[in-house]
Amino acid sequence: MVGAVATTAIGAASTAGAGPEEQLRSVLPAGYDPASCQSPNNQSSPTGVAQSMLALAALECRDNSLPGGPTYAYYRLYADNEKLDKAFSGEKNASRQAYWWFLPCPGQQGTGPAAAATWHENRAPDKVAGWMVCGKVYGPVHGNAEAKSIMWTRDSDRLLSIAEGPDLAGLYDWWTRNR
């Protein structure tokens, strides 16, 4: 289990009358200005076509302004948790083979590939908030061949996130404060 840490919510997934992209923007982590996040040019970027086809909306974001924040991130909104779980499993399996390798998250034991773990929020420590896994980017996918990554879901918002940055400890700290 990943340690429970307080999080900052910046919106709600069920924004009345909003389209999928507006709903997705309303649940992004803090630290992005409106111009930081754009719809991707290629729905398969950076991960599988099948998973992106399940998404209601997707955004690619750059240069989060908060300490430790990602230099690149990819966010997807899903219609339900079944599709969200299927996408997370698909990304995890595809990523293990081509996109990035799993690494232990800060505070996890071991040096080998880490398994996905559930995470919890402080306000509900007995309720699973989603799944997460840490890793290292393989190759210069978004300009940094040594980038570290965290992939997680937030079940309450049907959100899949993949965030990259140069330092896993800093990225993990950002994640625990802003997921």
Image (spheres, helix red, strand yellow):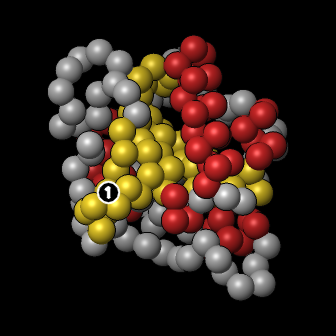
Coordinates of residue 121 in the picture (x, y in percent): 31, 63
Above or below 42: residue 34: below
Q: Is residue 45 left or right of residue 170?
A: right
Q: Quadrant of residue 107?
A: top left
Q: Is residue 42 visible?
A: yes
In the rendered structure, which amino acid carries the disc numbered 1?
A: His
Residue of label 1: 120
Could you tell me which residue is drawn at 28 percent across and 72 percent down?
A: 123
Identify the secondary structure beneath mark 1.
strand
Q: Is residue 168 above or below residue 156?
A: above
Tell whether 35 sits left or right of 115.
Answer: right
Question: Quick one: which residue is furthest to the bottom in this view?
Answer: 16
Q: Nearer the viewer, residue 26 or 154?
A: 154
Q: Please indicate, yes or no, whether residue 67 appears anywhere in the rendered image.
A: no
Q: How many marks?
A: 1
Between 46 and 78, the one lying in front of the other is: 78
The answer to whether residue 175 is above or below residue 103 is: below
The quarter holding residue 86 reads top right
**In this orientation, which residue lies closer to the viewer: 112 or 79?**
79
Residue 101 percent across, percent down from the top left: 45, 19
Q: Is residue 100 above or below residue 133?
A: above
Quadrant in the picture for the N terminus: top left
Residue positioned 52% across, 58% down in the render: 155
Residue at left 53%, top 42%?
162
Write the residue at 34% across / 25% down.
Answer: 114
